[in-house]
Image (tube, grey):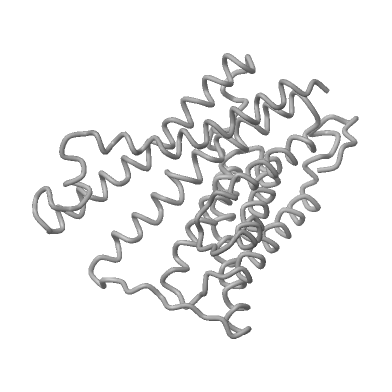
Amino acid sequence: MKVLPIILRVVIAAVLMFAASFSGVLMQFVPGYESILAGTAVGRSTTGLLLACGAMLMQFACATAVAYVGVRLLTRYLDHQPPTMLKLRPTKTGMLWFAAMIGVAMVILLIAGGVTILLGTTGEPLAQHGDQWWVTLIAVLGMAFLLQGIPEELVWRGWLLSSLGAKTTMRWSVGLSVIVFGTLHLTSNGGQSNAIEHVIYLAMPLGFAYAAAMARLAADSTWAAIGVHGGYHTAMLLANVLPINNSPTLWVLIGALWFAVGLAIRAWRRPFAPAQSDPQESAPA
């Protein structure tokens, strides 16, 4: 096993993820963009809100565009493989997994949130304007998929998983993609108040990343992983309108449930079976 090509790919994945994440900032340099985003370009009306939503989605879509172009270039010039390596072509199986994983994300949130409420920990739902619920929905879906779910899964489970799998065993590929991706979330700002909570918070990205990797391999489609990732963020954002407290207890429960989903997929579909991977694989996931 050559270590340098593996380290190079992991570093590239991290750099590309952050580059895609912050690429939308460039939209602020477009003349008039900020007034459109604020909903004041044509006055505070439904038309203004529609334009604001469009501008917001364009900013989020920058992340998806940068990630897509990046992984296509990496696939061609670093891996010397066809685009099919990314497993991005929509298939019936992939779309079914995509939808199913979004549903699983909602169930996980309700279970974890319900447990925290039973334990006596509740949160205060954010106030919503009754006639503008659709703006919140568009923002939630845009952030969950265009800004995070699609671009990050393109990088970590679409490109890196396959790229590392060609250099080492698929078990090691899964392990590296999950651990590095999860560890990078030490810098996340998800309601943590101290260093210990930053570590506890990692339970969620590590848990859903493992489930995303298992879903990606089981479905042979990156869309399955996108369903996990986008579904997770959709559920977490919708939690803001529910009496669920964003606490370390919730993070651990959600992370554990996602890890359990990953284990269930692994036991059910056996993604590391010799027929689908290297029969000489022996390294642990």
Residue 64 percent coordinates (x, y): 44, 36
Where residue 54 appears, as percent x and y from the top left, is 26, 45
The residue under the point 48% across, 30% down is 68
Residue 266 percent location from the top left of the image: 77, 50
Taking the image as shown, residue 186 lies to the left or right of residue 267, namely: left
Give coordinates of residue 202: x percent, y percent. 64, 55
Q: Residue at (68%, 39%) from the top-left corner?
A: 177
Q: Is residue 51 above or below residue 201?
A: above
Q: Does 158 appear above or below 144?
A: above
Residue at x-position 62% and y-position 29%: 11
Instruction: Using the rendered view, name the quadrant where residue 102 is placed.
Output: bottom right
**Does 154 sit left or right of 31 as displayed?**
right
Horizontal placement of 148 versus 35: left or right? right
* Quadrant in which the C terminus is drawn: top right
Viewer-nearest residue: 102 or 125: 125
Q: Quadrant of the N terminus?
A: top right
Residue name at image x 41 percent, y 38 percent: 22
